[in-house]
């Protein structure tokens, strides 16, 4: 998932104030104190190797690699004898591939000929026969094989691809799923190649957007197998080449455990579940759809979460009324105590492979896309998101349309 770069987290971010819980007269001393406390949370060393910093995260020392030590010219020199074969052109393939091309590196794309991804790649300027090939041809031509197929597709295609990943090549993943859960995926990596990981903390579209803005996304790097003794350096170089600003070292296991856990928890599944629970209680207690949506989703996403992202939870508390603070502090412990057993159950389900098994079985079905679209339509049809669609018509720029919408009735949305 996407995260902000360290410089942004270290500076004070000006964010629009929440409409209902922020005091009309904000307590400036409290905000100033929160701002002062926010900065030292990540402490920089007094001395550091260029491009590498030993940093303290809540008292734990970690090494962070920065892109400044890998300018474009150095990347081109490092990869001058390599052909980067990007297999798959989904979200990550699109973002990483275009960034590599813009870095001036020799990158080719491998996808199913004349399929949807092939057509999208052509639209993005990849040329059939020059830097766009079928999967097998791309793997044969490549020296760094970037397997960015979906998890299910990696498992399905592995018997064909593995023999083509010959000694001396490097195998690259952006998710530790396939090799970590090899008993289920059957992705047993060759023993005579380096196997590395660069996992951007966000979608491929975000990887591309931040690169074009001159910034860079946070990414995790890891080494699964080091045959040449240079696997870690390759991972760092690849991380910068695909558009990372900061690189954090991890393992394949920890990356996939935290990734699957986070997606099912606070990042997606858990937060949606909390939205639904709060909204449904408000509606059952007589509140209107617009009020329930505003108090559940709109204020959270548009007002409060940006404050947390800017400088932390205490920064958000400091910007809110004393009544809001007191209630939030009192209830947060109860939520944590009730939710922690469920989160432990979730982590166990990730670690023991249950989530992997479920994902592979479902996503490998021939009618997977039809079933997925049906589930998405069910979400779109939920009252909370139909109400939200109406709420988002309310900015001043949409006022001429509002009268028509209100006259016709929200139920049509």
Image (cartoon, helix red, strand yellow):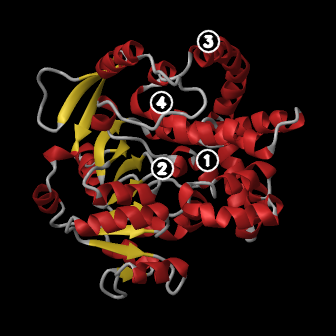
Q: Which percent across, then down, holds residue 270?
A: 67, 37
| Tag of residue 175 | 2
Q: Quick one: 273 or 50, which is closer to the camera?
A: 273
Tell whether 263 sits left or right of 242.
right
Q: Which residue is mark 1?
A: 183
Q: Quick one: 63 or 388, which is closer to the camera?
A: 388
| Earlier-in-chain disc, 3 versus 4 | 4
Q: Quick one: 314 or 94, which is closer to the camera?
A: 314
Mark 1, secondary structure of its residue: helix
Residues at marks 4 and 1, CA–CA distance in whole angstroms:
40 Å
| Earlier-in-chain disc, 2 versus 4 | 2
Q: What crowding class fits label 3: few (fewer than 14 Cα within 10 Å), some (14-19), or many (20 or more)?
A: few
- Identity of the residue drawn at 81% across and 34% down: 282
Res. 259 in view = no
Residues at marks 2 and 4, CA–CA distance in whole angstroms:
27 Å
Mark 3, secondary structure of its residue: helix
Q: Which percent across, then down, holds residue 215?
A: 27, 50
Residues at marks 3 and 1, CA–CA distance in whole angstroms:
49 Å
Q: What crowding class fits label 2: few (fewer than 14 Cα within 10 Å), some (14-19), or many (20 or more)?
A: many
Residues at marks 2 and 3, CA–CA distance in whole angstroms:
41 Å
Quarter of the figure with the C terminus: bottom right
């Amino acid at each position: 998932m996407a995260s902000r770069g360290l410089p942004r987290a270290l500076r004070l971010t000006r964010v629009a104030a929440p409409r209902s819980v922020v005091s009309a007269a904000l307590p400036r001393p409290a905000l100033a104190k929160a701002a002062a406390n926010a900065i030292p949370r990540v402490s920089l060393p007094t001395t550091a190797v260029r491009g590498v910093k030993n940093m303290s995260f809540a008292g734990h020392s970690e090494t962070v690699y920065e892109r400044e030590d890998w300018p474009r010219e150095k990347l081109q020199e490092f990869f001058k004898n390599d052909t980067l074969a990007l297999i798959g052109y989904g979200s990550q393939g699109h973002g990483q591939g275009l960034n590599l091309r813009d870095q001036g590196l020799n990158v080719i794309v491998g996808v199913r000929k004349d399929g949807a991804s092939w057509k999208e790649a052509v639209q993005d300027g990849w040329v059939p026969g020059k830097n766009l090939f079928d999967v097998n041809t791309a793997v044969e031509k490549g020296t760094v094989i970037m397997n960015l197929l979906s998890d299910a597709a990696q498992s399905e295609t592995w018997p064909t691809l593995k023999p083509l990943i010959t000694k001396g090549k490097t195998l690259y993943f952006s998710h530790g799923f396939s090799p970590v859960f090899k008993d289920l995926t059957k992705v047993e990596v060759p023993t005579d190649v380096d196997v590395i990981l660069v996992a951007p903390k966000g979608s491929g579209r975000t990887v591309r957007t931040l690169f074009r803005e001159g910034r860079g996304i946070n990414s995790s790097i890891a080494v699964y197998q080091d045959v040449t003794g240079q696997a870690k350096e390759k991972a760092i170089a690849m991380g910068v080449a695909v558009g990372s600003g900061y690189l954090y070292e991890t393992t394949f296991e920890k990356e996939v455990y935290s990734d699957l856990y986070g997606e099912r928890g606070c990042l997606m599944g858990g937060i949606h579940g909390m939205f639904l629970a709060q909204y449904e209680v408000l509606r059952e207690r007589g509140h209107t759809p617009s009020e329930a949506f505003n108090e559940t989703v709109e204020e959270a996403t548009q007002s409060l979460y940006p404050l947390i992202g800017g400088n932390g939870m205490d920064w958000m508390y400091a910007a809110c009324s004393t009544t809001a603070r007191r209630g939030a502090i009192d209830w947060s412990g109860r939520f944590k105590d009730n939710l922690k057993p469920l989160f432990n159950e979730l982590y166990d389900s990730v670690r023991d492979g249950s989530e992997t098994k479920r994902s592979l079985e479902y996503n490998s079905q021939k009618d997977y896309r039809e079933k997925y679209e049906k589930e998405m339509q069910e979400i779109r049809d939920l009252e909370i998101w139909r109400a939200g669609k109406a709420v988002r018509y309310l900015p001043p720029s949409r006022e001429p349309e509002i009268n028509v919408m209100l006259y016709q009735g929200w139920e049509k949305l």
